[in-house]
Image (cartoon, coloured by chain):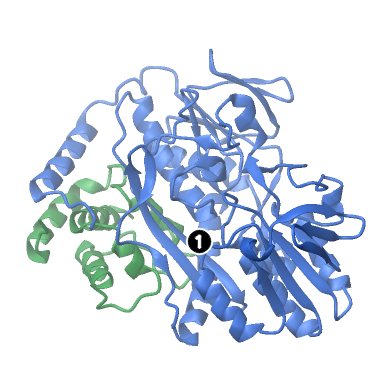
Amino acid sequence: MPRHCSRRDFLKAVTAGSGAALLPTPMLAQDAAPRVVVVGGGFAGASVARALRRADPAVSVHLVEASRTFTACPFSNSVIAGMRELAIQQFSYDKLAADGITLVSASAMAVDAQPRVLILATGTRLNYDRLVLAPGIDIRWGALRGYTEAAAEEMPHAWKAGEQTLLLRRQLEGMDDGGTVVISAPPNPFRCPPGPYERASLIAYYLKTHKPRSKLVILDAKDAFSKQRLFLNAWKELYPEMLEWVPLSKGGAVTEVDPATKTFTTDFGKHQASVGNVIPLQKAGRIAEIAGVADRTGWCPIDPVTFESKLVPNIHVVGDAAIAGAMPKSAFAANAQAKVCAAALIRLLRGEAPPAPKLINTCYSLVAPNYGISIAGVYQPANGQLTEVAGSGGVSLIDAPHSTRALEASLANGWFNTITSEAFG
Amino acid sequence: MRMSLASGLVAISLATAQAASLEPPAGASSCTGCHPANASVETPVPPLAGRNAADIVAAMEAFRSGQKPATVMDRIAKGFAVEEIQAIAAWYAAQR
């Protein structure tokens, strides 16, 4: 059961909060504007920059991002399956600039944590009071034998949306009817836990519609995955002869790939693909390692109240790069973490202690264009981690009618519009 | 111990007046991931800003108890105590 506070505690909290608001604002008005530098213009970085400006226009916010355009990953599986165009996934940073965020179009190269300077590839040095790293993921090239950047041109990962998304789509469009698509899914943790299975579903939908003699095989390094029963039931109903999932225990773990022949090797044998999609092992984006905020896992341990790094003070990490306990690496989670982090930063810059937050995640997946399923969760700090609130969360009902699946598909579409509007619109 | 809905309403009206200028209470900032902060966004999900606080509380209570049909809101409502729901509702009621 969730913890319940007493009515007296609640009123005390409300009164204390309003009392604090009546006090003269310390420091901010008198001193130079506090400076927050954000690295990474994805859902996490854009959201934290915007939330900071909205909460306190006196805070100076720089957003460092090398790309002029952001390409969103959610719904990019629909682009791969030919149901959606990539342009719908793309957003400029113009509206962020209009909010008073200073956009810096450059790559971050180094961090000097003492005296708090971010150094850009251009040589520019940006001083910060607080640095927020939202670098998303990088691919662990070479962690899977044979999978290099060059190999990704033959066997796309399409796990960062953009050219890779279009490459995988073109390969599917060019495949003969009767071909075999192979997707390899990585061990945890990775960006978008239900993503490989949504992708398999929508590619299967494409094959069923356009190339019905074809097959799709998922080679999985795991025996369990997000929304598993919902996916397995839907596959049985929608793609019974077409889609095969090979779990770890049945020989699903891929040990090597050969891009020249599009062959996946497992301990149990070889799978030759007409189209091969390698969803690779991942780690926090490069600047996290450079800044010293990534641990040996490649991800970034953080304080669950402030998202401040447990390794380097005054640097905060939000989104996929962070080790956020029970929260998944999703766009929804990145946006939710960003807003909590921004509120904490405002407090910290005023010399106040941020209160314990609560966060929500909701992730929709499409199994077919009109068939949506979801997972949701509520999280709070406990024992130094973000943990799921007992009794909350879970997945769509296993026996829901088709009308519910259709409703969830429309909610998924609405969610995309809402989250991209909040971050970029 | 849980508050009754009626006694909670007193707290809501008190809190609504004070909530507008404060930072969002725990949990509130996540809501706009689905409930659009910008009312012109195309989605079946209703915006929360400016809604009656008692209506938000009643809806959340009904989601939590299973009385109101839901897709995800039943699962989310179960993650919040009634006092937290009241604070979130008061804060959104005060937003414009």
Q: Residue at x 62, y 78 (%)?
A: A368
Q: How many marks?
A: 1
User: Which residue is identified by label 1?
Assistant: A418
Q: Quadrant of the C terminus of chain B?
A: bottom left
Q: Nearer the viewer, residue A59 or A170?
A: A170
Residue B42 visible at all: no
Chain identifier for the green-coloured part of the image: B
Q: Quadrant of residue A416?
A: bottom right
User: Against A108, is A224 above or below?
Assistant: below
- Secondary structure, mark 1, is helix
Residue A296 visible at all: yes
Q: Nearer the viewer, residue A280 or A371?
A: A280
- The spot of residue B90 in percent (x, y) is 23, 55
Q: Nearer the viewer, residue A22 or A189?
A: A189
Q: Residue at x 68, y 20 (%)?
A: A124
Kindly give the residue lying farthest to the top in the view shown.
A115
Kindly give the residue lying farthest to the front in the view shown.
A268
Q: Identity of the amino acid at label 1? A: Thr
Give neighbour class at mark 1: few <14, some 14-19, many 20+ (Cα, 10 Å): many
Q: Is residue A334 left or right of residue B74?
A: right
Q: Residue at x 71, y 60 (%)?
A: A184
Kindly give the residue lying farthest to the right in the view shown.
A260
Q: Quadrant of residue A181?
A: bottom right
Chain identifier for the blue-coloured part of the image: A
Q: Chain of mark 1?
A: A
